[in-house]
Amino acid sequence: MSKTPDHRWHDMGGDPAGSIPMDSHDFALWEKRVDALMILGAARGHFTVDGLRRALEDMGEDAFEKMTYYERWIAAINQNLIEAGVYSLEELGSKMAEVEARGETYGAAQ
């Protein structure tokens, strides 16, 4: 199916997608945390579904090809939280460095 200006790359409606696996998916701890962040952030008014969708669509086609579902969602949540002024890029970078300094085994026990 060719994409037209009215049919962007993320709109897959009508495209063949193959079979859908019906077996259950055991979510990783970090994926569950992404869901929790989405619920909490929306409940506190930091973003809306429309804001998340805009951030997802603005990522571009490459993100949809290379990132997993939850990787895209955490990126969209992060973008919306930064735009809402919940934290800055500098604060995020500082916290990431702090977590990295804890070592690779931090949080391994789930």
Image: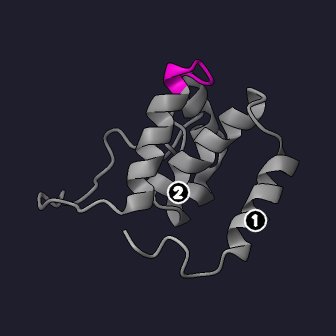
- The residue furthest left is 22
> Does 39 sit left or right of 57 as displayed?
left
Write the residue at 51% across / 43% down: 3
- Check residue 47 for magenta coloring: yes
* Residue range corresponding to the magenta coloring: 42-48
Name the magenta segment's main secondary structure.
Answer: loop
> Does 55 sit left or right of 19 as displayed?
right
Along the line of sight, the residue nearer the viewer: 66 or 40: 40
- Residue 1 can be seen, yes or no: no
Q: Residues within 10 Å of mark 2 (few under 14, many from 20)?
A: some
Inspect the image, locate mark 2, and give the three-letter code of the amino acid beneath it.
Answer: Glu
- The residue furthest top is 45
Write the residue at 50% across / 39% down: 37
- The residue furthest right is 90
Identify the residue position indicated by label 1 in the image. Answer: 98
Query: Where residue 24 sits: x, y (%)?
Result: 15, 59
Quadrant position of residue 22 = bottom left
